[in-house]
Image: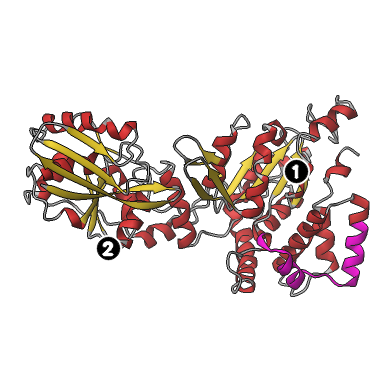
Amino acid sequence: MLVKVFGAAVQGIDATLITIEVNSSRGCMFYLVGLPDSTVKESHQRILSALQVNGYRMPTSNIVINMAPADIRKEGSAYDLPLAIGILAAGEVIHSDKLERYLLMGELSLDGSLQPIKGVLPIAIKARELGFEGMIVPRQNAREAAVVNNIRVHGVSSIKEVIEFFNGERELETTIVNTREEFYARQSSFDFDFAEVKGQENVKRALEVAAAGSHNILLIGAPGSGKSMLAKRLPSILPPLSLGESLETTKIHSVAGKLGSESGLISVRPFRAPHHTISTVAMTGGGSFPQPGEISLAHNGILYLDELPEFNRTVLEVLRQPLEDRKITVARARFSVEYPASFMLVASMNPCPCGYYNHPTKPCVCSPGQVQKYLNRISGPLLDRIDLQIEVTPLPFEKMAASRPGEPSSAIRARVIRARQIQEQRYADVPGVYCNAQMNSRLLARYAQPDEQGLALLKTAMNRLNLSARAYDRILKVSRTIADLEGSERIQPAHLAEAIGYRNLDREDWAG
């Protein structure tokens, strides 16, 4: 008897339908074909044990299983459940009349219980797209799949429940998630708030400008001056995720297996802070079983690199292309996978090895050569891609002891959202551009052209700071954002002056 069971393979952040064809005939051999990897081949032993423990027998016949399309490599243990159900249906242990209406995925334990799997959200989206009535997944993944509407999601604990369901002996509970209600309820819950920050008004202003235009920012200052503390509060002033952005972000985290069993859609922008010992593959994604890296997990959010010069040079250099293209392509001999990587880079660093160069009270013990060597760990091309470079100075005691709270994040966020709305309206007809940081040369010439007085100011700054053409573009983008925060139609010289002020830590000016 020939039966078909449906599963899915995840490639990048999208799923592909996999048809599992099981043919049972006279004999006693077992064949699994269709480019399965060793983990999929090992499923035979897990299925055998799971069926025995639950009181079922493996059909004693010639079983041939083909996983189509045969040119896509099938990886991982998530095919255990559809393979087991296909074998039982081919052996007429269960009825096969409902099989074509459901998509099945799940890893089997030896006792027949189901273990959670990765990538359930893109699989659920594909199942709905192909018109399946429902899907059966491990109970731990049910909420994640139920985010997708117009498809019935059944979370199950063991293979016995699935067998009884297809035999008409049991009804499976449907998991229902009120996606929109949960999504909007959690959008404003943050652990940190700018009201807790005393002083540092110039840095808070720079972070507000960075958030308003999604600009990359570098904080440079002595140890304990508050760089990490300020950076951790940045998500609280970013505009909320839209449903589309949230779905795309959740898909990436689903593929990487980073979603908990109780989580639905990600409602707050990601904040990823990898340690400086991270490898290139962990940062960009890839590996023998391709997974999204940190830059993709930070998609639509923030990638925070603390102690920037301590990162491996090659790790920092691979960031250059994703910062421009907002995607990363992982190429291998047989395939290539593309992951989105539209993130806001926030970095912090000390000004020298001892950390006290330019400190108001503590002397620096580093020689000029040591300071320059330390700063040279960050290449000019990467520094060019950082729009704002701001110095964080230590607070004097009087400001630290002050009891008056600072401006709350909610007030700053309201201004940021207003500026983003102006940008969204401006770029409504330009696909792929939503904020000032994403402007290309054509849009810069159209929307960020300064007047004669502004051009003269810009020329002086370019010559004095010896800035590159890319830095020139970045200054125009930042000044456009400052103008949006002010509600100004045109870029004024004051906006350009503030934007140039955020470049005063550029390479030639750092070591004095």
Q: Would residue 454 be counted in the magenta stretch?
A: yes
Task: Tell me, for residue 260, which label it has, or none.
Answer: none
In screen coordinates, is 461 left or right of 205?
Answer: right
Q: Position of residue 323 (x, y in %)?
A: 65, 50
Q: CA distance from mark 2 to mark 1?
A: 62 Å
What mark, if any, has residue 131 been given in the picture?
Answer: 2
Q: From the viewer's perspective, is residue 296 above or below residue 210?
A: above
Q: How many marks?
A: 2
The residue wearing badge 1 is 399
Of the two numbered discs 2 and 1 on the same chain, state the one appearing first in sequence.
2
**Where, by quadrant of the figure, is residue 419 drawn?**
bottom right
Q: Left or right: where does residue 414 sit relative to residue 227?
A: left
> What is the x, y in percent for residue 116?
31, 39
Q: Is residue 195 above or below residue 438?
A: above
Label 2 sits on a secondary structure element that is: loop
491 and 79: which is toward the camera: 79
Magenta part of the chain:
438-461
* Amino acid tagged 1: Lys
Kind of residue at disc 2: Gly
* Magenta stretch: includes residue 383: no
Horizontal and vertical percent for residue 201?
74, 51
